[in-house]
Image (cartoon, coloured by chain):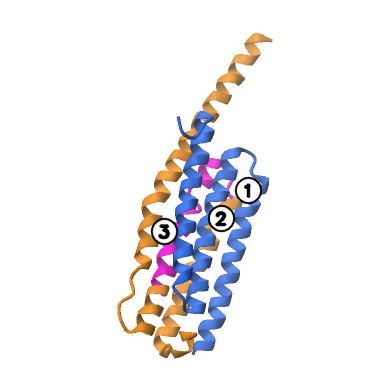
Chain colours: A orange, B blue
Amino acid sequence: MNGIEHLPPWAAALTAILVLIGAFVTLVGSLGLLRLGTFYERVHAPTLGTTLGTIFIASASMLCFSVLQSRPVLHEFLIVALGLVTTPIALTVLVGAARFRDTAERAAQVDEPEDG
Amino acid sequence: MSQLLIYSLLAAQLLLGLAIGCGAFRILLGPRAQDRVLGFDTLSVNAMLLLLTFGIRSGEVLYFEAALAVALFGFVGTVAFAKFLLRGEVIE
């Protein structure tokens, strides 16, 4: 039932390489989220994981299941498409909210010294 | 050769766990609310990728559906949080 032992060696090696590359790219993106200085720089870093990381790991999964079941198993395309479509929308809305908050805060800071 | 695949899947799960830790750390120490929302978004995407690697390891399709659900709820949650930061209410 655990089919991973029945993979031919080339498929196992290719799956291992794809999974490792995807995980490493995702980790690099998340480290960028931790290390970059301001919010507007930080927004860019995790998209590395949502695009390249998802594509690599989903293609590894597609390759593994396609070779195991000896027919094309392509339903991981759903996850890739969902990630590629939804991430820009979510982050654009988030950056819009952040800009709105920053602008409102700066306006309040400009107003305060005039009152005092 | 499948031993190599098992070990590399383990290494990938460790890397993805570290990435989830980065997201959680950003949620904990994010200076403002939008940083915490960004950390939540990263955390959900990384959890989705971790579920995919679990699916490859166990050879079951069930993990794929869980990963799809996590990705969908991560998107909906991020948009709802951002809308809440923008307006103070989610559905107007």
The relative height of residue A68 versus residue B76 in the rendered view (above or below) is below
Question: Can marks 1 and 3 be said to lie on one chain?
Answer: no
Marks 1/3 in contact by CB < 8 Å: the verdict is no
Q: Amino acid at mark 2?
A: Leu
Q: Which residue is mark 3?
A: A51
- Identify the residue at the far left of this view: A72
Question: x and y percent of residue A91 in the render?
Answer: 45, 44
Q: Residue furthest top?
A: A115
Please state the chain letter of the residue tagged with numbered disc 1 in the rendered image: B
Please determine whether, in this image, residue B85 is positioned above or below residue A52. above
Magenta stretch in the rendered image: A36-60
- Looking at the picture, which amino acid does disc 1 mark? Ile
The local secondary structure at tag 3 comes to helix
Q: Which mark is residue B43?
A: 2
Question: What is the crowding at mark 1: few (fewer than 14 residues within 10 Å), some, or many (at least 20)?
Answer: many
Q: Which residue is painted at 48% across and 52% down in the image?
A: B73
Q: What amino acid is at disc 3?
A: Thr
The mark closer to the camera, 2 or 3, is: 2
**Do callouts 2 and 1 mark residues in contact (Cβ within 8 Å)?**
yes
Q: Are marks 2 and 3 in contact (CB under 8 Å)?
A: no
Q: Quick one: SS at disc 1?
A: helix
- Residue located beneath label 1 in the image: B27
**Looking at the rendering, which quadrant does residue A107 occupy?**
top right
Q: Whole-percent x and y of residue B67?
A: 47, 63
Which chain does the numbered disc 2 sit on?
Answer: B
